Image (spheres, rainbow, N blue to C red):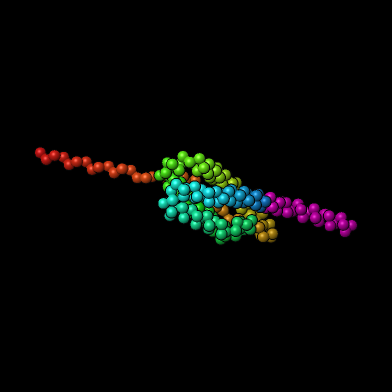
Amino acid sequence: MIKRLFSIGLLASAVLLSGCGYNTLQSTDEQIKAGWAEVINQYQRRTDLVPNLVETVKGFAAQEQQVLLGVTNARAKVGAIQATPELINDPQAFARFQAAQGELSSALSRLLVVIERYPELKSDANFRDLQAQLEGTENRIAVARNRYIKAVQQYNVVVRQFPSNLTAMLFDFKEKPQFTVEDEKAIARPPKVDFGKPAVPAPAPAPAK
């Protein structure tokens, strides 16, 4: 009799937890973890490309020290942050990670602008291969980030809405930090290449009558 009552209690608890969003919280949390792992994987792929890219550019444009140093320093800041699975539960650490990746994105954009001044570099086979890898990685980063963003949105809605919000509070499920809108705009904005337009000469004064 005791075993039967215990089984009934377990079944009732499972039904209540399912109806209150516990299973949904668990499944969406796992989706976030998987999405985050893919984001980290693609960001790491980009980080690994940077040293070879810098060395290749240096071979043709050693005088661009400031831009090259900016890329190298930005990569170092990214490497200094431990992108662990727990990072997505710490809004401040997540913000630091996001800022570091944004700085590296900006530094790479400036580097690509500089490259436009060196046709011989753009024609180098090794550089073209690295550039293709970088472009492909940036596309994969965008896809991975988009999946992560959707997973976090779904999870955060479950955490906030009733009655699953009561289950979230009971089992300490908290909202996850998200990539900011400003950062998404920066990622989507291509680098602007503008070497300036030749000055238009002022019109000659009309001859005196």
- Image quadrant in which the N terminus is located: bottom right
> In which quadrant is the C terminus drawn?
top left
Q: Residue 7 location, x and y as percent? A: 83, 55
- In the rendered image, residue 200 lying in the magenta stretch gets the answer no
Residue at the image point whose x is 68% and y is 57% from the top:
167
Residue at 61% from the left image edge and 49% from the top image edge: 41
Magenta-colored span: 1-28
* Of 78 and 67, the residue lying toward us: 67
Q: Whole-percent x and y of residue 27?
A: 68, 50
Q: Nearer the viewer, residue 159 or 142?
A: 142
Left or right: where 114 falls relative to 19: left
What residue is at 49 percent from the left and 50 percent from the top? 54
Residue 201 vertical placement versus 180 (above, below): above
Q: Position of residue 127 (x, y in %)?
A: 50, 43
> Which residue appears at 31% of the width and 43% of the height?
198
Predominant secondary structure in magenta? helix
